[in-house]
């Protein structure tokens, strides 16, 4: 059985590269729901920045995926 270091590097890159964005999306969503729960009238003001924050966090995960595919 041959051990391929490149495959291990790709697995670590995508694993660690998705850990941060996953936590970030969870924190963003949780804090947005907390803000809406405290002040329901502010849901329109909270929703768009929440989506932008989640999109930027997901973009980092996509960068990690691209790096894993190109290495």
Image (cartoon, rainbow, N blue to C red):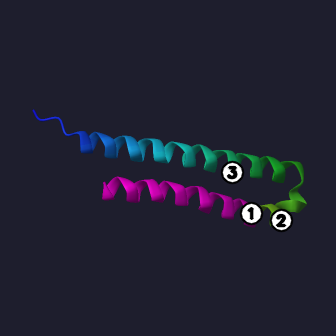
Disc 1 target residue = 49
Q: Mainly helix, strand or loop, the magenta region? A: helix
Quarter of the image with the C terminus is bottom left
Q: Please, is residue 43 above or below residue 68 in the view?
A: below
In the rendered image, residue 42, in percent from the top left (x then y), is placed at: 87, 61
Q: Kindly report the distance in space between the C-alpha atoms of the residues bearing marks 2 and 3.
A: 14 Å
Magenta-highlighted residues: 47-71
Q: Kindly report the distance in space between the C-alpha atoms of the residues bearing marks 1 and 3.
A: 11 Å
Density class for disc 3 (Cα within 10 Å; few <14, some 14-19, many ≥20) is: some
Q: Looking at this view, is 38 or 2 the one in front? A: 2
Q: Which numbered disc covers residue 45?
A: 2
Q: Please, is residue 52 above or below residue 26 in the view?
A: below
Magenta includes 70?
yes
Q: Please, is residue 16 above or below residue 58 in the view?
A: above
Sequence-earlier tag: 1 or 3: 3
| Residue drawn at x 54%, y 61% as measured from the top left | 59
Element marked by disc 2: helix
Element marked by disc 3: helix
Residue extending farthest to the top is 1
Disc 3 target residue = 29
Question: Which quadrant of the structure image shows residue 65?
Answer: bottom left
In the rendered image, residue 1, in percent from the top left (x then y), is placed at: 9, 32
Q: Is mark 2 in CB contact (under 8 Å) with mark 1?
A: yes
């Amino acid at each position: 059985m041959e051990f391929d270091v490149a495959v291990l590097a790709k697995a670590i890159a995508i694993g660690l590269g998705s850990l941060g964005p996953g936590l970030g999306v969870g924190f963003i969503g949780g804090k947005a729901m907390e803000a809406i729960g405290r002040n329901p009238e502010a849901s329109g003001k909270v929703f768009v920045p929440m989506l932008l924050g989640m999109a930027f966090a997901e973009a980092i995960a996509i960068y990690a995926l691209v790096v894993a595919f190109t290495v």
